[in-house]
Amino acid sequence: MRAAQTRVTGLLMLAVGATTALAVYWLPRVAHDAPLSAYHAPTLVASSVVVALLAAIALHRDSAKHTRRAFEQLKQCALSETPCAGDLINERSGGEVARELREHIDAQKKKIDNLLMQKKNLEIQLKIADAQRKQTQVMIHGISDAVIITDAFDETLIANPAAGDLFAFDANKAARQPVAKLLTGSALAGHITEMRQHHARTNRRTFEFEHEINKQVRHFSVTMTCVNDSADQFGGVVTVLHDITREKEVGKMKNEFVSHVSHELRTPLSSIKAYAELLVDGEASDEKTRQEFYHVIQTEANRLGRLIDNILNISRIEAGMTKVNKKPVDVSSVVKQVLEVAMPTAKEKQIQLVDQLKPVFDHVNADRDMIYQACLNLVSNAIKYTPSGGTVKVSLDVDEAARQVKVLVTDTGVGIPADAMKHLFEKFFRVEQNKSMAKGSGLGLNLTRQIVESVHEGKMLVQSEVGKGSTFGFTLPLAA
Ligand code: ADP
């Protein structure tokens, strides 16, 4: 509409210009019949040109103004994706402006397409990153060691349930919490802050850490690692706590075992050495004394042999390296053999050894030598810890319903104090109050339990009362 108006104005002004020229040319000629040269032809032409130029300028100014506005509108349309550009172009179809506008629109469309493409790519990358984050989180949650990951502000990024259990917090609510708040009362938070502050100097640090859980001190090997992000900037601290309490205990037990073994070996060895020296030095002047010394040396050597055998047997069973030769065994015949072997010692100590064996026809699937060793240990102990004049009864029974055979050795000996009962089967444990009654190493009961429970899936039994006596025994499953 506006363009049409402008065009009409232009044409009108051209018409006025032409009419003026004609009037200037024709009117004097009509009135005076004078030649054209007489009325200044150049003036005529100049006035016509001036009028025409004025018309052109007016046209151009209006057109430029309109083009600018149209251009702005088109830009708006292109940006807002409103379908209005076509109308404006058609209005000035074929013109330079229309071509520029089309180019501009195309360029804008390309930019928009590119942006949309980038947006899609970013969305895909975001989804992949999210999936990877979730997968990492699942893996960290599955680790049995406690894991805590903190950022550059000592705030928790991830803490797994093992860490939550250790420091009594909810691992699912740990994200974005200050680590000092989660680990309240623990020195670990301070170690994490220290690690973050010195990360440029130290990338990884390992140290041992003690933490009390349910009133029990546990030992941990802590590894702290500083990690950098993709831009090589400090990303955070990964803290992993590995429970080494068991390893520590085993290490301590090994040390104790070695010192016990050395001590136990030294005692009989010292006796053997001392008596041998007396003999060499001619200190035993008569045959009777010499025989006495020989006897001591023999007894101590046997004791040393038994001790070494026990140590080796226990460690072989514990390591699962012992050769077990299981066959159907008649336990009553084994017990009878033990009674025969123990009878002389019992007689010597004036102890009555009573056989209470019921006829048993069932067999157990067992290693005969090992079962013999277990029975002999119990009967020997009963004789050792029963004063003269006492009684040791050995019984054998079969419980058909439970499909097991039961061997019991009951004595009328010194008995065992209640506080010592729970330590009876520990290696090298000896009841303090009973030490003077007999020599021993404190390995016999441990070996007996290993044979019964670890090798033959049986069960040890014990009952005792100080001053009244004890009953030791075991059950073994009957052969199928
Ligand atoms: P030891 O070689 O010292 O006899 P054991 O392992 O066989 O080692 O026994 C451990 C400890 O248990 C003994 O030192 C003894 O104090 C106690 N004990 C074992 N059997 C009896 C028993 N029948 N009566 C009293 N105390 C016993």
Image: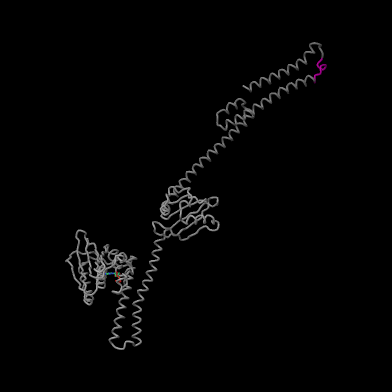
Location of residue 408 in the rendering, given as x and y in whole percent from the top left corner: 22, 66
Vertical relation: 92 (above or below) 286: above
**Which segment is the magenta one?**
35-42
Q: Residue at x 50, y 59 (%)?
A: 205
Q: Residue at x 60, y 30 (%)?
A: 74
- Find the residue positioned furthest to the bottom: 285
Quarter of the picture containing the C terminus is: bottom left
217 or 18: which is nearer to us?
A: 217
Look at the image and say whether residue 36 sits in the magenta stretch: yes
Viewed as shown, does residue 92 lie left or right of 239? right
Q: Quadrant of residue 464?
A: bottom left
Vertical relation: 402 (above or below) 296: above
Quarter of the picture containing the N terminus is: top right
Query: Secondary structure of the magenta portion, mostly?
Result: helix
- Find the residue positioned furthest to the top: 31
- Find the residue positioned furthest to the front: 467
Location of residue 23 in the rendering, given as x and y in whole percent from the top left corner: 76, 15
Q: How many marks?
A: 0
Vertical relation: 96 (above or below) 39: below
Location of residue 362 in the rendering, given as x and y in whole percent from the top left corner: 19, 64
Look at the image and say whether residue 403 sits in the magenta stretch: no
* Ligand 1 location (quadrant): bottom left
| Coloring scheme used | one colour
Vertical relation: 340 (above or below) 9: below
- Find the residue positioned furthest to the left: 359
Q: Residue at x 47, y 45 (%)?
A: 130
Q: Quadrant of residue 364?
A: bottom left
Location of residue 165 in the rendering, given as x and y in whole percent from the top left corner: 40, 53
